[in-house]
């Protein structure tokens, strides 16, 4: 037991070293990284040459850069944290269960990379362009609107977009792994964890959506439908043996 606690302490220590190392590097290159983060939304606006950010407090720029460095360190440490968890828990699984854990780690890293690319090049510019159409000044508007992006608010917007996209894709990964596991399990286990899954789904929807029930239902409904589809598949698989027959021999 002492060896397990010693190994756990070492792995937590490695994670903390990685976090603070990325934090210090992010703060050292803070201006270049912040420009890299703002570039996708800058090129989508019609005022590319005049794009700027404002701040309203004398310490806001320093605190925003510090917050940006901490969030960068936290986000980039997530794959390393999962890798250390995988190395710690892998010896405790049976040999027949270890391939599933290896696939889970591989899918997690792939989805994490794909989510970052998709969010940076597609989701973030599209969201910015969609909402900026309502705020930028136009001669056709009866009432002119002028938009001035606040430095701290923009960081919160980007952070929420990246973390929300990451959580959505990872939840789909967990449901996919649950589907793979459910093929070899019985219906009772899937029914047993159904209330916990619903609770986590709605808590997640409350976290990433505005405080109205309509938006929360829009986010939670696809996950619930997918989960119920898993239940229906297992039920039909148990009731009708023809589902167990391979289509191609």
Image (cartoon, grey):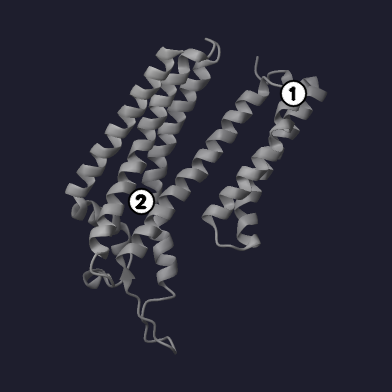
Give the secondary structure at mark 1: helix
Horizontal and vertical percent for residue 79? Answer: 38, 33
Q: Residue sitting at 33 percent across and 63 percent down? A: 152
Horizontal and vertical percent for residue 66? Answer: 26, 53
In the rendered structure, the answer to whether residue 145 lies left or right of residue 199 reads: left
Q: Is residue 43 visible?
A: no
Horizontal and vertical percent for residue 230? Answer: 69, 34
Q: Is 172 located above or below residue 46 in the figure?
A: above
Query: Residue 120, labelled with which disc?
Result: 2
* Crowd tier of the residue under label 1, counting other residues whose Cα lies within 10 Å: few below 14, some 14–19, many 20 or above: few
Disc 1 versus disc 2: nearer the observer: 2
Among the 4 quarters of the image, the one containing residue 234: top right
Horizontal and vertical percent for residue 46? Answer: 30, 72
Q: Residue sitting at 50 percent across and 42 percent down? A: 169
Q: Report which residue position mark 1 lands on.
A: 243
Q: Is 76 located above or below residue 245 in the figure?
A: below
Among the 4 quarters of the image, the one containing residue 141: bottom left
């Amino acid at each position: 037991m002492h060896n397990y606690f010693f190994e756990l302490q070492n792995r937590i220590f490695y994670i903390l070293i990685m976090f603070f190392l990325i934090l210090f590097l992010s703060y050292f290159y803070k201006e270049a990284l912040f420009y890299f983060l703002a570039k996708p939304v800058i090129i989508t606006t019609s005022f590319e040459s005049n794009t700027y950010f404002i701040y309203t407090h004398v310490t806001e720029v320093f605190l925003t850069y510090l917050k940006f460095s901490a969030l960068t360190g936290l986000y980039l440490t997530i794959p390393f944290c999962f890798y250390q968890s995988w190395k710690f828990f892998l010896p405790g699984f049976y040999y027949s269960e270890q391939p599933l854990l290896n696939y889970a780690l591989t899918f997690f890293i792939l989805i994490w990379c794909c989510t970052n690319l998709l969010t940076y090049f597609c989701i973030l510019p599209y969201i910015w362009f969609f909402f900026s159409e309502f705020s930028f000044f136009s001669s056709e508007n009866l009432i002119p609107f002028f938009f001035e992006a606040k430095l701290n608010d923009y960081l919160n917007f980007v952070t929420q977009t990246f973390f929300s996209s990451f959580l959505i894709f990872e939840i789909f990964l967990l449901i996919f792994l649950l589907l793979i596991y459910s093929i070899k399990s019985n219906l009772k286990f899937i029914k047993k964890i159904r209330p916990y899954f619903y609770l986590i789904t709605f808590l997640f929807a409350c976290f990433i959506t505005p405080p109205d029930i309509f938006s929360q239902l829009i986010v939670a409904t696809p996950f619930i439908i997918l989960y119920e589809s898993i239940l229906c598949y297992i039920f039909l698989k148990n009731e009708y043996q023809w589902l167990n027959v391979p289509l191609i021999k």
